[in-house]
Structure formats: structure tokens, C-alpha cells
Amino acid sequence: MIVQPTVNEDARATDVVVIGAGQAGLSSAYFLRRAGFEPEAGYVLLDGDPAPGGAWQHRWPSLRMETVNGIFDLPGMAFEPPSPQERASVAVPRYFAQYEEHFQLAVHRPVAVRAVRYGPDERLLVETDSATWAARAVINATGTWNKPFWPYYPGRETFRGRQLHAATYPGPQEFAGQRVVVVGGGITAIQLLSELAAAGASTTWVTRREPAFRDEPFTREYGREVVAMVERRVRAGLVPESVVSVTGLPVTDAIREAQRSGVLDRLPMFDRITPDGVAWDAPAGGAPGSIEADVILWCTGWRAALDHLAPLRLRAPGGGIAMDGTRVVLEPRLHLVGYGPSASTVGANRAGREAVRDIRRLLSGRGAEALAA
């Protein structure tokens, strides 16, 4: 099916539009500046948040720097370690703001990107709530924070207690004395379980799969294996798996203490939600049949925030977007940074450099054929 280009005579022309100013977007903008792209005419950096910091500014208030699961420097500027007790939602956004100012990365914010469409003259149209840009290439760095994943289980709408996702978790204090079911097998679930229990909540942990704890060091060789596994999926057009499903959970001193205290005694996933809690239809693996709960906390992850790319019709039969590195196979003018194998702080830096390198080749007139060579 041929997609007819959209004509917008009021669109502002630029070479590259970067969507998102988190780690991946700032990394991409840095490499664009380094490659000679000037603000506005050369590139435009759009961010949906009113302030610097990407997803970090929205992290729950009890997340401290000592419990953050790794922060890597943005390219060209070291992250000076703050106090271990400082909120991550304060320390990391401060670093991002300093980075933007130091490298003069002119960010348009808050700007909500509504759609990316095929435009005339071999350009992509980036439509926002404030303007439309006509770009020769687009780097999408929208991450996942704006798209929390809520799995459905029968009876969810009947629950009389409180349900919330980790994305809006306010900290442990208000759950003291309450019965909290924490759903999810990732590092977020473990962190919140530990602090909820310490604050006086009665916790129950449920996961779909038996948690896989990894006590071995995370070596460079293992890191490359993990990246290769995720990359094979996105090359095939499959939805990227979560990091934990590939790497397992790293065993830290805090996790060992939680294991000793019984906080991480896990139950298999319940079958349904009742008005007063959760229930198993065929109890197994230590499940009691039913548990009463005041709160269900869904630590079930996030999905890539790519709805604005729907007009480009990029989805593969496997549900994902087929990729070659950071480049979308069906649309070589579009790069996804912070997606699939680059969905980490260190991966985002490398992906930003790779995307800019490919875009330079594309805009030099050598075209998509040269990129595939």
C-alpha cells in the first residue's frame, strides 16, 4: 500500500529532529553538534517535559542515589557522584540541566509530539502541539516512562482497594500497616518490596516466572552477549524483551538481606483479582488459595512510547519494529535510540553516536543504499 505524503506548507525545515531529551536524546544532540549540525537549521531537540531530567525527574521520591541501578556519564561530561542519600529525581535532572547548558543544546519544551508522518520532498513531518517540523531525518528517543504496562487479570475492576503502577508510586510511608501485593519480577519490584516492608507494610511478592538471581560479575563479555540477544529480536521485528528477562537480577548486599528476612519469598502469579485481594484457582508453588490485600502495586514495567510513529506503519508481524542497528529497516530516515539493545544509559550513548554517523552518510547524498553497504 502506497502512503501518500502529507503536505504542510507551514512546516519549519530542519535537517534532523530529535524527539526526547533524556539520556538517549541528549547523547544524540551532543553527537549532532559535534558533527557540525547547528541548532534550528541543523537539528531541533524536542522534549515533552517542562524541565530537564527525562524520566529521572519522575522517579519515586524514596529512590536514592545509593540504590540507583547504575548511572553512566553522558558523552563529553562526567557525572560527579552526588551524596548517596540524595534523591535520584533531583541529582540526575540537575546533571542533565548542566549538560544542556554546557553544550548549548537548545531544547524546545514542553512540546508534545503528536505524530510523525511522511511529508513531501523526501522529508518526514513531525507534528507537535506547537509547530510542525519538516525533517530530512528523525531520531526518536522517547523511552518508555510515559507508557507503563498494566497486565489485565480477571476481576481487576472489582477490587475495592487501591491499585497503582510503580510509575506513580509515592514512597513507602503511606502504606505503613497495609497489606500490599507487589507484582513483577524486576529490580523495581525488589527495591519497593524492601522499602515497603521496612516502613511497616505487610508485603506479598508475586511473579509470572521464578526470579533468576545472578551472583556472577557482569563482565564485558556477558554484556555483549546480552546486547546480541536483544539485537537479534529487534532485527527480526519482535518486541524487545525486558533487561531482567535476559540478564537476571544482580545479587547485591541489599538483595541478600531481603532474602534473609523473607521479604523476597515469592509466590506464583495469581489467576484473578477479588474484591478483597487476589486468588489462585489451582494453588501451587506455595500459593495459599487467596490473599487479602489493601493495595496491589504493579511493578510490571513499561513499553516503548512509539504511538506517535503509528502513521508510518512500521510494525512488523512480530509486533515490534525491525531494526538494523538504530535504523528502522522500513524507514532509513528514522532512528530509534534507547530502544531494544540501546535501552540503557551506556547503550543510549553508543546508539546516539551510531545514529548520527548513519544520518551524516544519508544526508551527504549517499542514500539508504550506502547505509546498507
Image (spheres, rainbow, N blue to C red):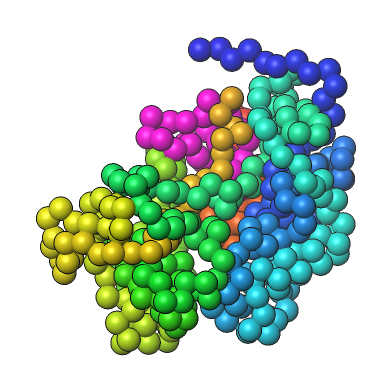
Q: Is residue 318 visible?
A: yes
The reply, left or right, for residue 141 in relation to residue 302 is right
332 drawn magenta: yes
Residue 245, given in percent of the width and then of the height, sits at: 36, 59
Foreground pick, 370 / 199: 199
Residue 159 percent location from the top left of the image? 35, 52
Q: Which residues are magenta?
A: 312-338
* Up-down relation of residue 232 to residue 242 (above or below): above
> Along the line of sight, which residue is nearer the eye, 30 or 44?
44
Q: How many marks?
A: 0
Query: In this picture, is 373 found above or below 145?
Result: above
Q: Residue at x 32, y 76 (%)?
A: 264
Residue 25: say if magenta.
no
Query: Quadrant of the rendered structure where residue 70 is?
Result: bottom right
Q: Is residue 365 left or right of residue 102?
A: left
In this rendering, would 6 be left or right of 189?
A: right
Percent position of residue 294, x then y: 38, 64
Quarter of the rendering containing residue 42: top right
Residue nearer the viewer, 304 or 206:
206
Residue at position x 50%, y 50% in the image? 148
Q: Is residue 148 left or right of residue 35?
A: left
Quick check: can you spot residue 187? Answer: no
Residue at position x 81%, y 31% in the image? 131
Q: Quadrant of the C terminus?
A: top right
Query: Which quadrant holds residue 254?
Result: bottom left
Q: Position of residue 212 (x, y in %)?
A: 30, 68
Position of residue 143 relative to residue 7, above or below, is below
